[in-house]
Image: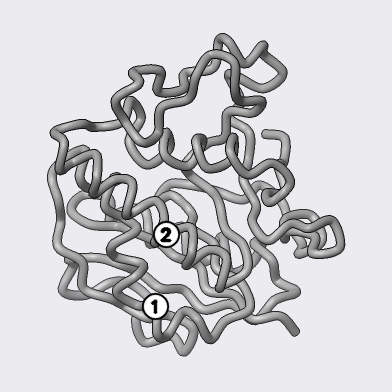
Amino acid sequence: MKTLAILYICTGPYAVFWHDFYPNFKANFLPDCDRTFYVFTDAAHIDYEDAPDVRRIYQKALPWPQSTMLRFDAFLGQADALQGYDYLFFAIANLHCTRVIRADELLPDPAAGQSLTAVCHLPYYGKNPIFHPYDRSGKSRASIPYSCGQYYVAGGLNGGTAAAYLALCRGLKKRTDEDLQNNVIARFHDESQLNRLVAETPGKFRILPP
C-alpha cells in the first residue's frame, strides 16, 4: 500500500476547519493509501491530535499574504520526515470531499513521465490562456509572458511523489525569497509561482479538470 502524507495548515481562525476536515478526508481521500495527516498550526491543542495518523506541528500564524506565500518553508521544516513517504499532498483548510477519491484518479502517472499533480481552477478551465490571471508583471519570478502557458491551476490541492514535491517546495521557496528580496510579491502569491512552474515544465504534472 502506498504511503501518503497530507499537508494541512490551520493557523489562527482557520483551525476551526480541522474538526470537519479530518473525518471527511479520512473517509474519502485516497482510502486505498496509508495516510498520515501533518497539521501545521499554532493551536495549543487540536481535535484528534491523539489519533495515530495525526502529527501536530507548531506553525506560527503569519499575516496575509505571508501565510500562503511561505507555506513551502513550513513543509520543508519537516523534510526529513516527509521524504520517507511515497507521496505528499497539500490540501487547503476548507476543502471537502463529496465522494471517495482513489489513488488512480489523483496520483501522477510515472509511465507518462509525471511526478506531480495539479488541478485546474474552475473559473478559467477551458478558457484561452490569454485570459488566465497569471502574473504578467515581468518583475516576479512567477511572471508568465502572454505567449506562454496553457492551464491555470488552483493552489488549494496539489502534490506528487515525495521527492518531486519537496523539490517543488525548495524551488518555489527560492523563487519567492528572491521576489521578497526585490520587494516583489507575485499576483496570486504561491498560486502564481505554482502556475509558472506548471507552464515551464510541460509533462511533469498530471493536470486534472476541476
Type of the residue with mark 2:
Cys
Residue at image coords 24%, 32%: 185
> Dot 1 lies on which element?
helix
**Location of residue 111 with respect to 180 vertically, above or below:** below
Residue that label 2 marks? 169
- In front of the other: 143 or 208: 143
Q: Is residue 177 left or right of residue 209?
A: left
Q: Amino acid at mark 1?
A: Ala
| Residue 198 position within the rendered picture, expressed as x and y whole percent measured from the top left | 58, 40
Residue 100 visible, this orientation? no
Q: Is residue 176 above or below residue 41?
A: above
Mark 1 crowd level (few <14, some 14–19, many ≥20, 10 Å Cα): some
Q: What residue is shown at x 66% (from left), y 25% (from top)?
A: 150
Cβ–Cβ below 8 Å for labels 1 and 2? yes
**In-image side of 47 versus 178 (left or right):** right
**Residue 9, percent across and down?**
33, 59
